[in-house]
């Protein structure tokens, strides 16, 4: 049914890291050009699932080893033909977010902030511009973080969270420096709260609609934190959800709607499929003038 050339093309037409991200599965860390995950096939406290992006293969030390097709067959519970169709029909891009919960206190995980300044690095400004974010909006809410790590010194856009950590972003990397936590902005005594998945979406909202300090704004920074915010939301009369229009974003949205049926889910009306998120909406408006 499929030629050898078609099969080989399918193995590399979609990166395993992007496929896993589409399912809400994010790496714990990177090492030696590989991504380390908790295995998606079992509960574990020590991550043992590796992905090698260069060759687009996975190695599940407790179970199996293989390419993209084999992984799709296992996770989607499909036969070979079904997995090929799934890969061919796959659409969309997904951010890879390095998450590091409860990693040991070891030098290989340690980072040190060198300085924190206004965002002036042309590469960061160009990256923000490529996402539709102007320099004024960027600097109103973010800082430039220069930090050292065992692999060298790096510079990223930093967005402060409530755990005194920084959410980091540049054209090649998305991660966190310090504790992973939510970010709260605006008037927390307001009757209205606006909830976003990541800070690029929050900044996109500001560009699209402006920023009112009389409202409350909550950036999850990670969907794994959605359970933490469910109870505190009961103080707000109006809950506006601007989460991603993908499987993991929809799941988080449903968690909030189950507890607060009157919450307003904006993704369907404001940025329907094929738009993935609020930043896609902003970029669509920039390209089309509406």
Image: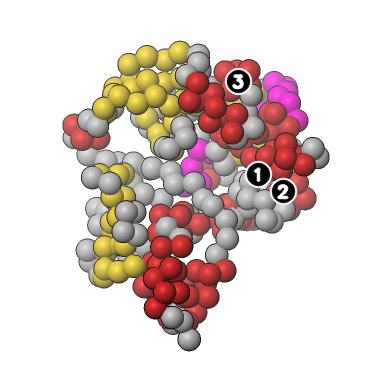
Q: Residue at x 48, y 42 (%)?
A: 222
Occupied quadrant, residue 191: top right
Occupied quadrant, residue 111: top left
- Residue sticking out furthest to the bottom: 1
- The tally of labels here is 3
On screen, residue 13 above or below 186: below
| Of the two numbered discs 3 and 2 in the rendering, the one whose residue sits closer to the viewer | 3
Q: Confirm or deny contact between disc 1 and disc 2 (CB under 8 A).
A: yes
Q: Which residues are magenta?
A: 209-224
C-alpha span from label 3 to label 2: 24 Å
List x then y, in percent, for residue 69.
Answer: 40, 71
Occupied quadrant, residue 186: top right
Neighbour tally class for label 2: few under 14, some 14-19, many 20 plus, Cα within 10 Å: many
- N-terminal label among 1 and 3: 3
Residue carrying label 3: 135
Determine whether, in the image, residue 37 is placed left or right of residue 210. Answer: left
Residue 218: tell me if it is visible: no
* Residue 141: mark: none
- N-terminal label among 1 and 2: 2
Residue 115: tell me if it is visible: yes
Q: Secondary structure at mark 2?
A: loop
Residue carrying label 1: 280
């Amino acid at each position: 049914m499929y030629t050898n050339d078609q099969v080989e093309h399918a193995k590399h037409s979609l990166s395993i890291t992007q496929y896993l991200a589409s399912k809400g599965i994010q790496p714990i860390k990177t090492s030696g050009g590989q991504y380390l995950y908790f295995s998606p096939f079992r509960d574990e406290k020590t991550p043992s699932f590796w992905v090698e992006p260069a060759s687009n293969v996975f190695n599940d030390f407790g179970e199996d080893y293989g390419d993209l097709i084999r992984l799709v067959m296992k996770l989607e519970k499909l036969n070979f033909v079904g997995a090929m169709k799934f890969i061919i029909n796959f659409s969309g891009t997904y951010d890879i977010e390095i998450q590091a919960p409860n990693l040991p206190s070891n030098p290989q995980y340690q980072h040190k902030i060198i300085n924190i300044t206004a965002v002036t690095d042309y590469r960061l400004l160009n990256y923000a511009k490529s996402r539709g974010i102007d320099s004024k909006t960027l600097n109103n809410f973010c800082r430039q973080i220069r930090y050292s790590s065992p692999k060298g010194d790096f510079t990223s856009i930093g967005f402060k969270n409530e755990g005194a950590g920084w959410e980091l972003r540049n054209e090649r990397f998305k991660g966190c420096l310090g504790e992973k936590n939510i970010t709260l902005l605006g008037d927390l005594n307001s009757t209205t709260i606006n909830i976003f998945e990541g800070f690029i979406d929050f900044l996109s909202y500001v560009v699209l609609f402006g920023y009112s300090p009389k409202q409350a704004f909550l950036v999850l920074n990670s969907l794994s934190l959605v359970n933490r915010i469910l109870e505190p939301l009961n103080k707000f009369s109006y809950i506006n959800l601007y989460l991603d229009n993908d499987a993991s974003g929809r799941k988080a949205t449903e968690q909030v709607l189950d507890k607060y049926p009157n919450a307003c889910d904006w993704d369907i009306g404001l940025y329907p499929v094929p738009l993935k998120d609020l930043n896609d909406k902003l970029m669509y408006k920039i390209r089309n003038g509406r």
